Image: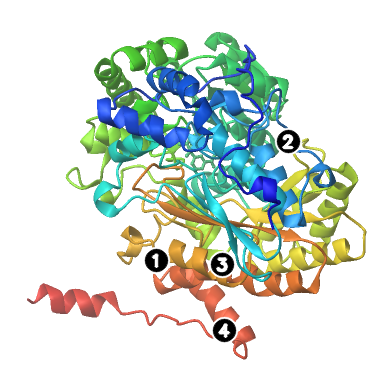
Amino acid sequence: MLENNERKMPLQLEELPPYPEFEENVDRAPSRGFFLNRDETILALKNALRYVPREYHEKLAGEFLEELVNRGRIYGYRFRPPGRIKARPVDEYEGKSIEGKAIQLMIDNNLDFDVALFPYELVTYGSTGQVCQNWMQYNLIKHYLKNLTRNQTLVVLSGHPLGLFPSRPEAPRVIMTNGLLIGEFDNQKEFNRAAALGVSNYGQMTAGGWMYIGPQGIVHGTYITILNAGRRYLGLGNDEDLRGKLFVTSGLGGMSGAQPKAVEIAGGIGVIAEVNDKQTFKRHRQGWVSKVSDDLDEIFSWVDEYREKMEPVSIGYRGNIVDLWEYILENDIKVELGSDQTSCHAVYDGGYTPQGLTYEEAIELKDRDPDAFKEAVDRSLVRQFELLRKITEKGMHFWDYGNSFLKAVYDAGAREIAVDPDNPANGFIFPSYIEDLMGPMVFDLGYGPFRWVCLSGKQEDLDKTDRAAAECIDPDRCPQDRDNYRWIVNAKDNDLVVGSKARILYQDAQGRVRIALKFNEMVRKGEVGPIMIGRDHHDPGGTDSPYRETSNIKDGSNITYDMAAHCFAGNIARGMTMVVLSNGGGVGIGKVRNSGYGLVLDGSERVDEIIRSALEWDVMVGVSRRSWARNENSIKVVKDWNRDNGFRGFITEPEIADDSILEKIVDEI
Ligand SMILES: NC(=O)c1ccc[n+]([C@@H]2O[C@H](COP(=O)([O-])OP(=O)(O)OC[C@H]3O[C@@H](n4cnc5c(N)ncnc54)[C@H](O)[C@@H]3O)[C@@H](O)[C@H]2O)c1
């Protein structure tokens, strides 16, 4: 129950907090543009003022208006807690339940200055992915979490905490949604309007799902992607790594910053372009990129040196990716693997810096003259495509890294990038990393980015869980388990932790259940403190997107999101601690629905039961759907599951029709 004096919502204030000071060297989100008309502007102000006692409205209205006009959003900076936010050990949080405390920790980690992309604007990663929309919501969410009991569920609508509702201990403690727009309005323009009005949040995946663990979360996936690219495109054996091979790409941001680290772990050489020096130097300071230069001659002399030595190295190029590709073409440099990780899901919102402009100039042009900015972006994307076409003709293998790069090039006017220039939904001339690599070789088998956070904040807990997880994996079972085993035994030495004591480890359904049960037992025995498990939404069952996760679903159902909705509903029904469903993660509004979860391991037998039913469901919903879509590897996993679990349930298996019969009768029509 809330205390009597806490019942009067919204925010309780003795007095207005002072206007905060902003640290100079911390990146700020670019303005999202001011485009509301007079009545909409008034509506946006009224919406934001709902959180604040009336006596402060007059003073705050002007301040909020200024934020709206200058930043395109009302963030309510005044309500941001002073100083740096950091995830603290769970015991240091106030709360009436371990879940309420754990979730506060997860939120704070998403806003840590070392983790978040634009911490003042509540953006965790991916250019626009926010924890919630404004600092009033943050305070209110925190307040509810402090009071949350096991008989209540906090309901969050696009960052807005609708309230603490009576429920029961077996129900989730938090259920959230982000950016769920009605079909007719499900596009970027309407979303921008809704976000400016303060009624919709772009949650990306784990930003608005409160399960981000810093770039480590993506290093493992990137490592697996690059290794599998080597196997598929360069014919490397399962035991080989990328020694002596060059991978060129762009982006040292939230997720893209994982690329240099991953290429080094995979044994290769990486050159990564980044236009924003703050990002480059941040990654360099953190040790995620080994060398940095703005001199391309110097960079490629390093490449030659490391090729010769057959040693891994990652190099950040302080400049535009288009300039880097131009140099490579002009100097006839051999590149084996190539990709791009600029934020093309938001190209016209500042996610992509056009050639010829610095990062700062691009932001300035976008704010001053959005049409001219759009033209510059389109020109640059088309130029990048022309260069890539020529370089791939010389033997480089290029793939879309799930950032909507191919679609952005198409939208910029280079329609020849689509297999069918009139319909980009039929695919592009370059593969996506899901179609060729992650889909068949990882997701279809049920493998995905399982993760955990040691809520005690203790390194020794992380070490113990790393060892326990390794003991749960048989490296000889399959190539995936060999990669994952290698990953986890080397994880500590690779110095991957930024923010909370967390670990990522790709696992399939069985592996996740086995490891989670082991961890819960360790908590029960007092060997480690409580643990939060979860995953990225970029997983076999969590996400429906024809542009990414489900791009290797070829039965026509890739335009539906029944699977992500069922994943969400099923995880609620089975009692995960925190469950979320969002629109937009990764590839943009209207192009994806994704769901995720978090589960607090408190050592109880109740949690053992949730692990057994919910963790398995969360993966097998995806594998079952992939199997129904006739994906070969999934059919095999489903057959095995039915053989081993027939007494517990049964998954529908597809009959495979013979194409030659069908082609014959259809051709005869
Ligand atoms: N890493 C993955 O496994 C993965 C998976 C799926 C999707 N993605 C996608 O990758 C994209 C990047 O994600 P993020 O979190 O790193 O975003 P981010 O915005 O944090 O980083 C992108 C970086 O690219 C830089 N950049 C923009 N234009 C550039 C240019 N022309 N040349 C050089 N650098 C440029 C930006 O300055 C920025 O630092 C997103 O669209 C995301 O959805 C990544």
CA separation in Å, label 3 and label 2 = 28 Å
Q: Which residue is mark 3?
A: 572
Q: Which marked residue is nearer to the observer: mark 2 or mark 4?
A: 2
For the residues bearing labels 2 and 4, Cβ distance under 8 angstroms:
no
Q: Report helix, strand or loop for mark 1.
A: helix
Task: Looking at the picture, tell me which residue is in the foreground, 491 or 116.
Answer: 116
240 to 646, vertically: above or below? above
Q: Report helix, strand or loop for mark 4.
A: helix
Name the kind of residue labelled 2 in the image: Gly
CA separation in Å, label 4 and label 3 = 24 Å
587 to 572, vertically: above or below? above
> Which mark is on residue 642?
4
Relative to 445, 480 lies left or right = right
> Which mark is on residue 499?
2
> Which mark is on residue 562?
1
CA separation in Å, label 4 and label 1 = 22 Å
The residue lying at 52 percent from left, 28 percent from top is 55
203 to 77, vertically: above or below? below
Task: Looking at the picture, tell me which residue is in the foreground, 248 or 545.
Answer: 545
Relative to 143, 334 lies left or right = left
Mark 4 neighbour class, 10 Å CA radius: few under 14, some 14 to 19, many 20 or more: some
Q: Earlier in the sequence, mark 2 or mark 1?
A: 2
Mark 1 lies within 8 Å of ligand 1 (Cβ measured) = no
Quarter of the image where one finds residue 380: top left
Mark 3 lies within 8 Å of ligand 1 (Cβ measured) = no
The residue lying at 62 percent from left, 30 percent from top is 260
Name the kind of residue labelled 3 in the image: Ile
Q: Quadrant of the C terminus?
A: bottom left
Q: Which marked residue is nearer to the observer: mark 1 or mark 3?
A: 3
